[in-house]
Amino acid sequence: MSGFKYEVLKNDSKTPARIGRLTTPHSVIETPVFMPVGTLATVKALSPEEIKDLGAQIILANTYHLYLRPGTDVIEKAGGVHKFMNWDRSLLTDSGGFQIFSLSKLRKITDEGCTFSSVVDGSRHFLTPEDAMKIQNILGSDIMMAFDECTESGVSEAKARDAMERTLRWLDRCYKVSEDTSKQMLFPIIQGNMFKNLRIESAKRTAEYARCGIAVGGLSVGEPKPIMYEMLEELYPYYPKDQPRYLMGVGSVDCLVEGVYRGIDMFDCVLPTRIARNGTAMTFRGNINLRNARFKEDFRPIDSECDCYACRNYTRAYIRHLIISDEIFGGRLVSIHNIRTLMRLTDKMKAAIREDRFKEFHDSFMAEYKDKADVDAIP
Amino acid sequence: MSGFKYEVLKNDSKTPARIGRLTTPHSVIETPVFMPVGTLATVKALSPEEIKDLGAQIILANTYHLYLRPGTDVIEKAGGVHKFMNWDRSLLTDSGGFQIFSLSKLRKITDEGCTFSSVVDGSRHFLTPEDAMKIQNILGSDIMMAFDECTESGVSEAKARDAMERTLRWLDRCYKVSEDTSKQMLFPIIQGNMFKNLRIESAKRTAEYARCGIAVGGLSVGEPKPIMYEMLEELYPYYPKDQPRYLMGVGSVDCLVEGVYRGIDMFDCVLPTRIARNGTAMTFRGNINLRNARFKEDFRPIDSECDCYACRNYTRAYIRHLIISDEIFGGRLVSIHNIRTLMRLTDKMKAAIREDRFKEFHDSFMAEYKDKADVDAIP
């Protein structure tokens, strides 16, 4: 019997937005959900307890990175990533496909699999779709991702089709070795670059492999945001209706709102923690850079409406001082704030959907949102 | 009325070791005590709550660093360091004298004060003893340190005497501007380099300025440990009996035991957090370097007898993986472990003193301690 279940709890009547509940062997996840990324079996700077306090029911780890360091053998002996990192809620692992595409310079892709050089030490490796599944079996994630080929924005349609077709052939192989869904669920990934016809074809053929979740890959790879939103609109009619839809690698405030508006249920991204360590804080009005001199004697919290540990206890002036001084605690505080901001955002979106006013929420929220916030507009 | 009090609760009968209780306006501190260092108003990588959980009743901050960044004006507007960093227990600030000596290349010392260049941006600054007191008034520490001149190990006796005499003249000036002991207590600092006669003379003359605490400065500056221990033995007869004695800048496991054995009540050092970020863990048997390949598949805690968060939840293999991968959480975990190790050590020493067996404790502890631990001897 499958350890997985997805129930739609509420559909917004005017948009594809919805509230759902995904059950895995480790936890119950309300969607829309943002999943913090713990690339190397640690969400950078934070403890598992802090991540739980932020409200996270699921985090992500990276197969590519863990395969290279500490190595699959170490994690196998540790009893899987959950035990290794002391995380008892749900875990999603990507397949490594995207990292081979984005990180490894020397890569060669054939139907059999990928040859690539390690980003850690340059050593050569070869991975097949079956290997990617086997490694994720050992990592012990609740949700495994199919091994896919990603293409950059701007390639020819022929190249994009080749990669899409190969991704589908690989998906078939991944599917065959992941039939046991008692502990792990395979999410197939829609590809097709920025070509609508390819995206639709990929969605239709990929949906056949979806049992309790489907992902959209190959977006947010450099294309303008409106292109991404357009692709999501094209894809929407072809998703399995009763399964969660996961938009990979997306995690800004505006993209979460626009994604949910187009039927997305799950998101992940390193963005909130990565920009945090450089002093950029997320708010519902846009991002602010705490390094800015204007915050030097600003003794208000980052966001007075935020309930996170950083906003309850520290001022912009103090956090700015920490960031300017390269103090680790600064990156920690802003990471906490940024993840909590995305958690508060999904809570806000769920409330709007519950009250069947997501369209209004979306419109007024986006009217006030700027990439770079008007600081005076932050509560 | 002074907000400070020191009571000796128990004297060991065979050694100068003792248990005491120092009361400040912010907390009650049992001695012997190790004070974690929060140079820039943050104990590197840790939150105030974590530091409290470790058992710390007092931490240290650095006047030199805070004066340069974020600047005294910012901290004044924030309402002092306590409020700025969200720390409600005791705080000790050094005077900046040691940092001018150890960090600033271009420095010129006259009787009036010190000219030095900033370690942050090279800008020139001039500080008098009165300035150092005024800055510490603004920082709002419970315990202020006198502005002193430190000399390196190896200078001539004439130079050491000059610095000692100047330190005494400066002490007189510091004392005159810190007569109000309701909120802040000035600790004078004994200097004298490695010359016994100078140390004794400095101790006698410095003791006249001690009201509720006296410090030993200018040790642990590169001299062999036996020399430091010898100096402490020389000094012992000249301390005010009813006041705590603070050995500045010392914080290794062995030096804490040897210090208490020679009548020291208070210690501070960046060592436990600094070496932690590089993966060196402290134990009662000596230090271990978690980067070592032998820990790759070692699924035991750092120290199975340690009750810290790191040892209760994580393995050497996991922490090694974090450290090797430059993950912030690795440095956090080892920092927690190292500070807790020193806290557990002072608890152990207090228990031995309470039972009047500190001599035996010292001898058996030091017989088993090595700078580099025999890993198999760690529980």
Image (tube, coloured by chain):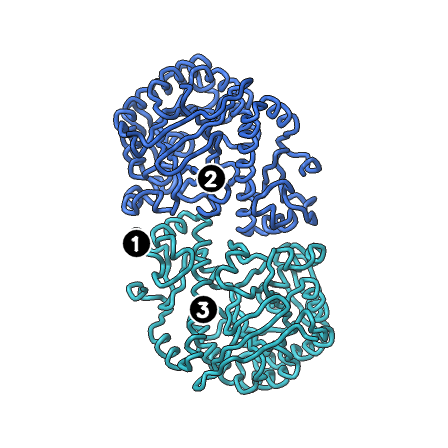
Chain colours: A cyan, B blue
Q: Is residue B217 visible?
A: no
Q: Alpha-carbon distance for marks 2 and 1?
A: 29 Å
In the rendered image, the quadrant that contains the C terminus of chain A is: bottom left
Q: Quadrant of residue A351?
A: bottom left
Residue B205: x percent and y percent? 36, 16
In-image side of A8 versus B131 (left or right): right
Q: Chain of mark 2?
A: B
In the rendered image, the quadrant that contains the N terminus of chain A is: bottom right
In-image side of A138 versus B104 (left or right): right
Q: Which mark is residue B56?
A: 2
**First along the sequence among labels 1 and 3:** 3
Report the mark closest to the observer, 2 or 3.
2
Q: Residues within 10 Å of mark 3 (few under 14, many from 20)?
A: many
Secondary element type, mark 1: loop
Q: Is residue A75 above or below residue A98?
A: above
Residue at x 62% of width, y 66% of height: A26
Secondary element type, mark 2: loop
Q: Alpha-carbon distance for marks 2 and 3?
A: 39 Å
Same chain, marks 1 and 3?
yes
Residue B348: x percent and y percent? 57, 32
Report the mark closest to the observer, 2 or 1.
2
Q: Chain of mark 3?
A: A
Q: Chain of mark 1?
A: A
* Nearer to the camera, B82 or B16: B16
Q: Which mark is residue A252?
A: 3
The residue carrying mark 1 is A298
